[in-house]
Image (tube, helix red, strand yellow):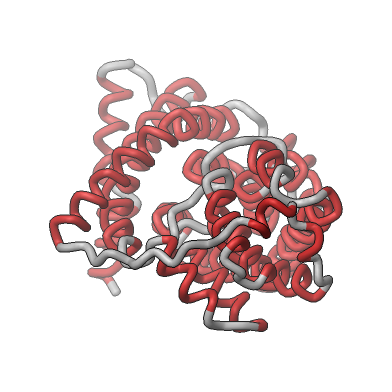
Amino acid sequence: MNILDWLNAQLLKMKWLWVLVELLVERVFKLSIDTRLGGSIHFFIYDTIKIFILLSVMIYVISYIQSYFPPERTKKLLGGIRGVKGNILGSILGVLTPFCSCSSIPIFIGFVSAGLPLGATFSFLISSPMIDLAALMLLVSTFGLRIGVTYVVVGIIVAVVGGVLIQGFKMEEYVESYVLAAKGSDIEVEEKTFKDRMKFSKEQVRDIVERVWPYILIGVGIGAGIHNWIPQSIIERILGRGNPFSVLIATFIGIPIYADIFGTIPIAEALVTKGVGIGTVISFMMGVTTMSLPSLVMLGRVVKPKLLATFIVIVTLGIIAMGYGLNAFTALLI
């Protein structure tokens, strides 16, 4: 256990980096990290470097694994399984595929046009942006394994239940006719060589880092502000465990924000240190990543208002229910 603790501290939490940045702040900026300004500078530099290092390494490794699951193969896997099993498989495949809420929409169109079950397709649509393997590793490095696993389990439950309900409501008629009329093509999955997969992984690192770096800097900046400048009493009053509306507030704050999950992690870290419940924090993160306004606008172009409204209500209620459930569960453990 001592070896595992040391590896976790040095490789995931990067304690060595914490010490180096502390020296930088004290000797270059002539500030103590116990002050607000010094603590903010330390938080910003440390979290930014840590996230980019972990992000690059994890995206490379995970993208290599994900190269075995292109959309064509995912479509074939989903097409062969019906019922709740299809929803479970759709949500798991969503976890394994690196699509944000907006880029998931074209995949959704392809799946529906190919005749895949609508419920399983929506399970995929929910879990793909909500849960990311690289983000999971960052969560583990920040909050520990239990919180990381909880995030994945909660996300999969929301995705499965959402897909099952949409399938049960038999809402195929509320998909736009041009999507249903499109003919899905059976494209043979071209097997990649080792070099192809390495090239794909490098491209994924470059593409994702170029896409998310502004959100990371903004998220770290907000996290530094919350961590060092906003009094804990204010955070606890608005989002603390004593406020029965904390999960509702966090969810509805998160929904209109368009950001990547990597940008929400430093904010979540700062909120947890201020005494915000983990269920409230996870509700905020899920609201940001799953229900972004750009993705809802895009989804509104391919499904009719009734199905769009049903999707929004189911996912929002699922996130809120899971947030309150997690807060209640963690309260019992304290």
Residue at position x 66%, y 41% in the image: 298
Q: Please tell me how many numbered marks the rendered image carries.
A: 0
Left or right: residue 51 compared with residue 275: left
User: Residue 238: image x %, image y %?
Assistant: 78, 40
* Nearer to us in this view, 2 or 215: 215
Residue at position x 64%, y 44% in the image: 288
Instruction: Judge whether residue 196 can be spotted in this image.
Output: yes
Left or right: residue 11 compared with residue 245: left
Q: Which image quarter is the N terminus in?
A: bottom left
User: Residue 265: image x %, image y %?
Assistant: 51, 45
Left or right: residue 116 compared with residue 233: left
Q: Which image quarter is the C terminus in?
A: bottom right
Q: Quadrant of residue 307?
A: bottom right
Above or below, comparing residue 159 to residue 300 in the picture: below
Above or below, comparing residue 34 to residue 202 in the picture: above
Instruction: Judge whether residue 276 can be spotted in this image.
Output: no
Residue at position x 13%, y 56% in the image: 195
User: Residue 268: image x %, image y %?
Assistant: 57, 45
Above or below, comparing residue 267 to residue 63 in the picture: above
The residue sitting at the top extreme is 29
* Nearer to us in this view, 139 or 105: 105
Q: Quadrant of residue 274?
A: top right
Residue at position x 53%, y 58% in the image: 131
Left or right: residue 228 compared with residue 211: right
